[in-house]
Amino acid sequence: MNKPFVVPVNRDSACQPPSAKDFLVDRTFRGLARIGVVLILALVAALVFEVGRKALPGMEKHGFDVLFGSVWDVNQGKYGILPAIWGTLYSAFIALLIAGFFGVSMAIFLTQDFLPAKLAAVFRTIVELLAAIPSVVYGLWGIYVVIPAIRPLTAWLNSELGWIPFFGTSLSGPGLLPAALVLAIMILPTIAAVSQDALTSVPMKTKQAAYGMGTTHWEAILKVMVPSAATGIFGSLVLG
């Protein structure tokens, strides 16, 4: 008579219930994480308080005209920063559109089996190295390289398409387009690097399940992988 087959049990396997030590480590980590969140919020509150305290005399003297005024004239005592605020938001929005598209495209290209593994690792290292370049280097490169390079193009766009508000002004100096391009190139490595981590963190079983449902390679990427990594990709845009 054959003996029944008994599967040996490995007491050290991951199938065992968590021990008291595991619970202690988990609670300690949760406590440290909560303390870190509280410290970050306290730091932000301290920064806002300090900036507000230093700005209070100016706000009492000029009111909210500083925020909503468009005239900056020291002789007349008028200090309006609305054009600076609007220019910053506008250039950052354009830079996010450009860098977001190309950064996510780079992340997809380097993580979804379009290149051999070793070659993709080389390109990922290059992208991470580009993210470490100081912003002042990008600024100088924009002034001495980008602006002279795009000046003929912007002159043609202004002369031919000047009826469109976006091309309505000539590039007489450092303008919005060079600023947006430099910002886009500056944040592109960060967006690409973090988006790569977000895509690689999606379980491979998710992609295999999409293939099992009959999707093509691009359908699996755009309809399954990218939505699954959407939170991480959004975080890369915010970090950029």
Image: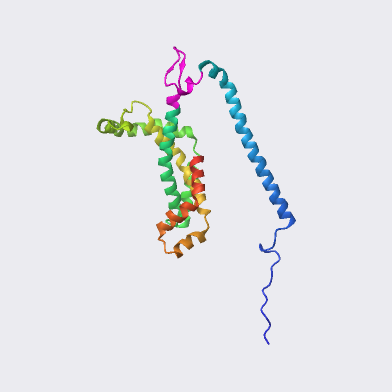
Q: Give the quadrant of residue 176.
A: top left
Residue farthest to the front, as pictured: 64
> In the image, is residue 210 above or below residue 236?
below
Residue farthest to the top, as pictured: 75
Residue extent of the magenta highlight: 63-84
> In the image, is residue 151 above or below residue 9?
above
The answer to whether residue 139 shows anywhere in this view is yes
Magenta run includes residue 59:
no
Residue 40 is left or right of residue 239, and the answer is right
Q: Give the quadrant of residue 31.
A: top right
Q: Which residue occupies 51% across, 17% down?
A: 62
Residue farthest to the left, as pictured: 160
Residue 183 spot, x, y in % from top left: 44, 36
Residue 49 spot, x, y in % from top left: 60, 27
Magenta run includes residue 82:
yes
Residue 119 spot, x, y in % from top left: 45, 54
> In the image, is residue 214 above or below residue 90?
below
Q: How many marks?
A: 0
Residue 100 is left or right of residue 21, and the answer is left
Residue farthest to the right, as pictured: 20
Residue 113 spot, x, y in % from top left: 44, 57
